Image: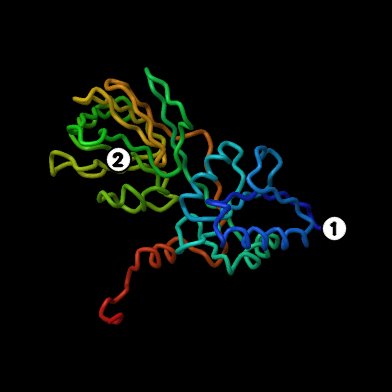
Amino acid sequence: MSEEKLKFVVFGNDYRKEDIAPCIQRIEQYLAQRHALVQVDPGDLEEADYAISIGGDGTFLRTAKKVGELQIPIIGVNMGRLGFLADVLPSEIEEALDDIYAGNYFLENHTVIRVETDGEHLVGYPCALNEVAVSKRDTASMISIRTYINDEFLVNYQADGLIVTTPTGSTAYSLSNGGPIIIPQSRSLCLTPVAPHSLNMRPIVITDTSVIKLEVESRSHNFLVAMDGRSEKLVGGTQLTIRKAPYSIHVVKLMNRRYFSTLREKLMWGLDERQRK
């Protein structure tokens, strides 16, 4: 009985880097032995069975953007330190592909959020895997963000910005602003203010079925909205609606990779500094 012929698409953060080309070559050599089809940075992903992201979590986010609604499972190969999304090390590539062909993996579904505007339209991709962040421009005065959850008024944030994060993004920008760590399966979102005028303003966790509406005002008459770091300028008074996208991103996780072990290693929990001296 012949082995199923699979199609893999490969994306890298910078193909000019010395460590990227050998990594892609190893993947191509391995998959050639499996009689699989491999395409590097293709334009058409329709028939792909798996996407391989080679870089870090930033590269993974760009790969997720390209995969979009196709929901192709993504394998993250991390060329730097261990990542939350890209957690396969280059030395483990062949072993990881062996496990994938053997079915020794599971798919972790990650929520995507989408931004809609009632006035000025967004130019770029309106979805985010990590977070949507509203912020002031440059050194302008703080902005006012009147916030509603399911059409119920929550609060008027006076702050440098507001982060609406998914569980995936909870360990990124939101965490650096005091937001909580949220596990991927929690089905929740979090609103984290950035440098709020009032110290009583704290992050709030809501269900991911909630519809968030933001009315943003600024003395400079404009503000920034960023989807996974891709910023666009909008006119003050523009209303944003943020809701769960109708699709999720499927992340390939090997059986020896678990969220909490990655969390401990990435954040160095339990590390005794005295033992390093």
Q: Nearer the viewer, residue 137 or 126?
A: 137
Q: Amino acid at mark 1?
A: Ser
Q: Amino acid at mark 2?
A: Leu
- The C terminus is located in which quarter? bottom left
Label 2: few (<14), some or many (≥20) within 10 Å?
Answer: many
Q: Give the residue displayed 29% in from the left and 29% down from the top.
A: 223
In the picture, the disc for residue 191 is 2
Marks 1 and 2, Cα distance to the nearest angstrom?
51 Å
Query: In the figure, is residue 227 to the left or right of 203?
Result: right
For residue 137, which quarter of the picture?
Answer: top left
Residue highlighted by disc 1: 2
Seen in the picture, residue 199 relative to 123 is either above or below; the reply is below
- Residue 162: x %, y % from top left: 27, 37
Query: In the figure, is residue 63 to the left or right of 143?
Result: right
Seen in the picture, residue 252 relative to 138 is either above or below; the reply is below
Q: Give the residue displayed 85% in from the left and 58% down from the top.
A: 2
Query: In the figure, is residue 267 to the left or right of 159?
Result: right
